[in-house]
Image: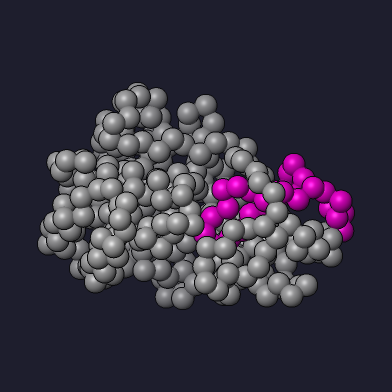
Amino acid sequence: MGLSPGVARALHSDEIPIDAELVRGLVGRAMPDHAGSPVRRLASSGSTNALFRLGEELLVRLPRQSGGSATISKEATWLPVLGPLLPVSVPEVVAVFEPDRDYPERWSVVRWIDGAHPEVVDPDTSVDPRREDLAKNLATVLDALRQAEVPTGAANNPHLQSYRGEPLATMDQATRRNIERCRSLADFDFDLAAAEQIWAEAMKLPGAADRTTPRWYHGDLAAENLLVRAGALGAVLDFGGLSVGDPTVDLVVAWEVLDPPARELFRRQVGVDDATWLRGRAWALSITLMIWYYWTTMPDRRASRMTVGRNVLADAGCSV
């Protein structure tokens, strides 16, 4: 994973200013034994947390917006519980620290995990049988999450709730608004009329408006939150979106990192019915259409989300 110097690029209007100097100051006070360790911003910092590598073994995660402390605390609470149940590595939280030096949120330090993000696969990418291993690995992660016990009270814990665990139909108005926002982007490059039709058909799917038995789900299984080693899935990152609800949204990853044969294998391994699979595809489309928000600020995410959208259209038999 690449590194770049200095300042975390602002992505939000309410962004908290974060740079390497701030991180050095926070680390110097909270972890004096690491005060002299190099601090380097991670080029692939996400939209929720700014990421800085600390020496060779650690990673510092700082929320970009007010209220981000909640996800930092959630990871520290639940990763030790769920991590041992998963068949891949997850971030090991070394410590969580309180606000300091005018930085207003809790922040965490986790162990560094080596690996590379998997390739984003577009409709023109050649089929590679090695992706079947990734498909199997992803299916085992989803199965482990879904089989994990949901403790009493977790389903009603506000810190374990997200719109991504609600019935698909709750996204109808927002998705249609996002289609219109994307129409205003001159260089948006896939068929929004076809996307609108796919979405309209998804709203008629069995279960689109129904609540399911609450299960654990990751909430943001995307290439940027996966690490592979020798073609196999080695780690799942960023559990800030970890929640309890309908886990269908975790199927979205199939339209980003899997080619059609591997995607079909993933589908069989996960064992979902046709309606659930198509609701997962609709979630992939809905999340793609949110990209207008990061259109100019996150070019890598923009490219990957557009690829997901093209895969959805191709999967539905539309021209791309």
Q: Within the image, what quadrant is residue 291 found in?
A: bottom left
Whether residue 88 is visible, yes or no, is no
Eyeballing the image, is 89 above or below 11? above
Q: Residue furthest front?
A: 186
- Residue occupying the point 69% across, 49% down: 5
Rendered location of residue 48, percent (x, y): 54, 62
Q: Is residue 200 left or right of residue 3?
A: left
Rendered location of residue 64, percent (x, y): 59, 66
Eyeballing the image, is 241 above or below 3? below
- Residue occupying the point 75% across, 63% down: 22
Q: Is residue 57 magenta?
A: yes
Q: Is residue 116 left or right of residue 308?
A: right
Q: Which residues are magenta?
A: 32-59
Rendered location of residue 58, percent (x, y): 72, 48
Q: Is residue 217 left or right of residue 259?
A: right
- Quadrant the N terminus occupies: top right
